[in-house]
Amino acid sequence: MKHFLRDDDITASQQRMLLTLTDELRAAPTAPLLATPVPDLTEATVPRSIAVVFEKESTRSRLSFHVAITQLGGSPVVVDSQTSQLARGETIEDTARVLSGYVDAIVFRTYTQERALALAHAARVPVINALTDAFHPCQALADLYTIAENFGSATGRTLAYVGDTGNNMSQSYLLAGALAGLHVRVAGPPQYQPAPDVVARAAALAKTAGGSVSTTHDCRAAVDGADVVATDTWVSMGQQDGQQRLRDLRDYQVNSDLVKLAAPHAIVLHCLPAHRGEEITDEVMDGPQSRVFDQAENRLHAQKALLAWLVAGHGGPAAAKEHLSK
Ligand code: CP
Ligand code: NVA
């Protein structure tokens, strides 16, 4: 069973295929890849159902998965854990077994990576990570697509991520960026560093793909000459030490002085939601280099590719093209 729980659950060539498929599906928004023909009934199809389960808040992931599944001819079942028996302590394993009898895949947003893994281990259908404390691989895929959209390809470009380098976005940029052959520099205070095993894994992937990864406490050095400047909230969902974090991270703001150090053609990314005036200024967020709203839209396109491949079992762009031309 193939799951997408972290960025390196796919190979570099699968990542390239998904980015190409993203382009194909963007051009054909209503491809019925999640509708299964009913045998012996001409033209009749049954939608594949996909559960989208949230144990944390969401705007973009909730909406983009719902719309992606619908546009592919499937049927989304979006559930908040607070309104399900998960809130009363039904185990994640039992929940996985039950959902596997109803749906063709489970999209899951939760706290620990271990909880997402537990769901996947007990499930009989593919599980997609829609954010854990450790990784946000669907966002990173959309971001690679956004980078490719602007520069032709992400390979060989330099991405500087500034802020909480221990959070899900930083760790996903390290892994997904390394797979894509990006040069990924992450800059944050010493107490908010990525996990050493993630950095080591990213370094190994980067070596194969021709990119590199580095960690630093110096955000100006990280941004120097970069093609992409990325940031994220200083206080992620579930973190209790908000006031302390705001103090510790205040020198890591993405503002116009910092962006000036990047390449003149640099673009600015933020997965959103943004805390304007904290990790990013209005001037940068609304400025000409910002691509944050393209990035949000690209969640839809990239997730359609992911669903088409993981759930509908599509072999890649050629298979998708063949299907689309029918
Ligand atoms: N970027 C992102 O995942 O946004 P949501 O939390 O709104 O889903
Ligand atoms: N790091 C943020 C990302 C939100 C999409 C969080 O986990 O809250």
Image (cartoon, rainbow, N blue to C red):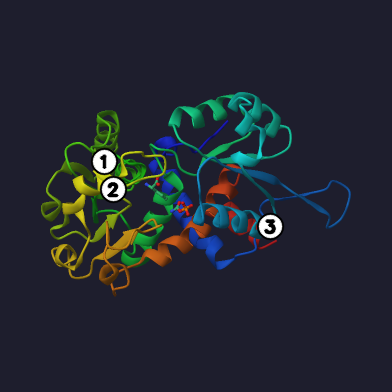
Q: Which residue is found at the position 63% from the left and 29% from the top?
A: 88
Left or right placement of residue 50 versus residue 252 in this view: right
Mark 1 near mark 2, Cβ–Cβ under 8 Å? yes
In the picture, the quarter occupied by the N terminus is top right
Estimate the spatial distance between the alpha carbons at disc 3 and disc 2, rounded to whole Å.
32 Å
The single residue placed furthest to the right in the displayed view is: 40
Q: Which residue is mark 1?
A: 206
Q: Name the element at disc 3.
A: loop
Q: Which is more N-terminal, label 2 or label 3? A: 3
Q: Name the element at disc 1.
A: helix
Left or right placement of residue 262 versus residue 181 in this view: left
Circle 2 packing at 10 Å, graded few (<14), some (14-19), many (20+), is many
- In this view, 26 is above or below 165: below
Residue 193 location, quadrant? top left
Front in this rendered view, residue 146 or 164: 164
In the picture, the quarter occupied by the C terminus is bottom right
Q: Which residue is mark 2?
A: 181
Q: Which residue is mark 3?
A: 32
